[in-house]
Amino acid sequence: MFACVILLINIFLAVSGLFIYRGRIPNGDSVPNPCGTGGTWNGVGHYNQNGGGTLNPFGLEFSLNYRMWTIALCKADSDGDGKTNGEELGDPFCD
Ligand SMILES: [Ca+2]
């Protein structure tokens, strides 16, 4: 029983954290699926589309940046694809 309560608390924290962090980046609730298969990527910052688990390069930088959207993070190209994070998230001028 105790293990179930702990599991539910961890799930709640993971899900609530997901929504809190999505609100800290531009268009965080409507990031397109980068795989081109349609839909949105709810797990922004994670390899898992629905969040949780291993952080992707953007998630690592976001975490190291105290989970805040800054001009430096906006101008960075976390995944090395040639586009800044701002360009990818709809904030190309980092304003
Ligand atoms: Ca990029």
Image: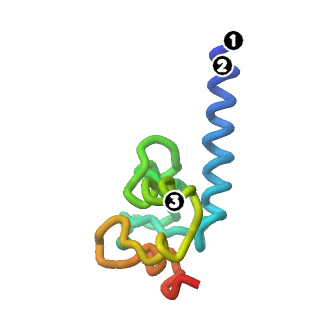
| Residue type at numbered disc 3 | Asn
Secondary structure at numbered mark 2: helix
Q: In the image, which is nearer the foreground, mark 3 or mark 2?
A: 3
Residue at image mark 1: 1
Left or right: residue 72 versus residue 25 is left
Q: Do the residues under discs 3 and 1 have CB atoms within 8 angstroms?
A: no
Q: Do the residues under discs 3 and 2 have CB atoms within 8 angstroms?
A: no
Q: Give the image location of residue 10, x and y in percent.
A: 63, 32
Q: Residue at x 37, y 57 (%)?
A: 57
Mark 3, ligand 1, within 8 Å: the answer is no
Secondary structure at numbered mark 3: loop
| Residue type at numbered disc 2 | Cys
Residue 3 against residue 28 in the figure, above or below: above
| Residue type at numbered disc 1 | Met
Residue 45 against residue 69 in the figure, above or below: above
Q: Do the residues under discs 1 and 2 have CB atoms within 8 angstroms?
A: yes
Q: Residue at x 44, y 48 (%)?
A: 48
The quadrant the N terminus occupies is: top right
In three-dimensional space, the C-alpha distance between marks 1 and 2, rounded to whole angstroms, equals 5 Å
Left or right: residue 45 versus residue 68 is left
Of residues 61 and 6, the one nearer the viewer is: 61
Of residues 47 and 78, the one nearer the viewer is: 78
Residue at image mark 3: 65
Q: Give the image location of residue 77, x and y in percent.
A: 36, 72
